[in-house]
Image (spheres, rainbow, N blue to C red):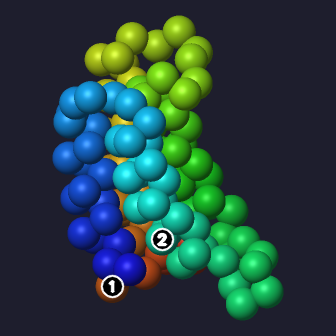
């Protein structure tokens, strides 16, 4: 999977309407590519930091698409999503997830 293209698609989906289950299905498919990059041949997670960044994006898309609620306005969720996607983008190097958080 081309992770950089997947990030671009995730960025587009943040502001695309409608915010429904179909949108979340697209997000889930894109994020499953990130999950597979962060999983070794035995199915174990390679890097906790990467997993946290992937989960942040997943959680905010759940909220945006009405699957989960936690009191955020749609504008705040979108703002948090753009930030979380940016942080996920910071750990992609040569189209692979890096094993170190930025700055280490």
Helix, strand or loop for disc 1: loop
Q: Which residue is drawn at the image coordinates 72% and 72% (left, top)? A: 45
The answer to which quarter of the image holds residue 59 is top right
Q: Say if mark 2 contacts mark 1, CB within 8 Å.
A: no
Q: Which residue is mark 1?
A: 94
24 relative to 83 in the view: left or right: right
Q: Which residue is drawn at the image coordinates 58% and 24% (left, top)? A: 68
Q: Examine the rendering and report whether any part of residue 8 can be seen.
A: yes
The correct choice, above or below, for 95 with respect to 18 in the image is below
The correct choice, above or below, for 65 with respect to 56 in the image is above
Which mark, by number, is residue 33? 2
95 relative to 48 in the view: left or right: left
Image spot of residue 60 (x, y percent): 48, 34
Q: 10 Å neighbourhood of mark 2: few (<14), some, or many (≥20)?
A: some
Sequence-first disc among 2 and 1: 2
Foreground of the two, 98 or 59? 59
Foreground of the two, 11 or 26? 26
The correct choice, above or below, for 35 with respect to 9 in the image is below
Image spot of residue 20 (x, y percent): 38, 31
Mark-to-mark CA distance, 2 and 1: 15 Å
Q: 10 Å neighbourhood of mark 1: few (<14), some, or many (≥20)?
A: few
Q: Quadrant of the N terminus?
A: bottom left
Q: Residue furthest front?
A: 22
Foreground of the two, 17 or 48? 17
Image spot of residue 33 (x, y percent): 48, 71
Q: Examine the rendering and report whether any part of residue 80 can be seen.
A: no
Foreground of the two, 49 or 9? 9
Image spot of residue 83 (x, y percent): 35, 40
The mark closer to the camera, 2 or 1, is 2
The answer to which quarter of the image holds residue 37 is bottom right
Q: Which residue is drawn at the image coordinates 41% and 61% (left, top)? A: 30
Q: Which residue is drawn at the image coordinates 58% and 15% (left, top)? A: 70
């Amino acid at each position: 999977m081309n992770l950089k293209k997947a990030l671009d698609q995730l960025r587009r989906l943040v502001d695309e309407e409608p915010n429904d289950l179909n949108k979340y299905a697209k997000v889930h498919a894109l994020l499953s590519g990130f999950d597979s990059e962060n999983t070794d041949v035995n199915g174990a997670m390679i890097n906790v930091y990467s997993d946290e960044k992937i989960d942040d994006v997943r959680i905010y898309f759940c909220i945006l698409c009405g699957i989960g609620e936690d009191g955020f306005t749609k504008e705040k969720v979108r703002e948090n999503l753009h930030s979380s996607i940016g942080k996920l983008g910071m750990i992609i190097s040569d189209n692979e997830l890096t094993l170190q958080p930025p700055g280490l």
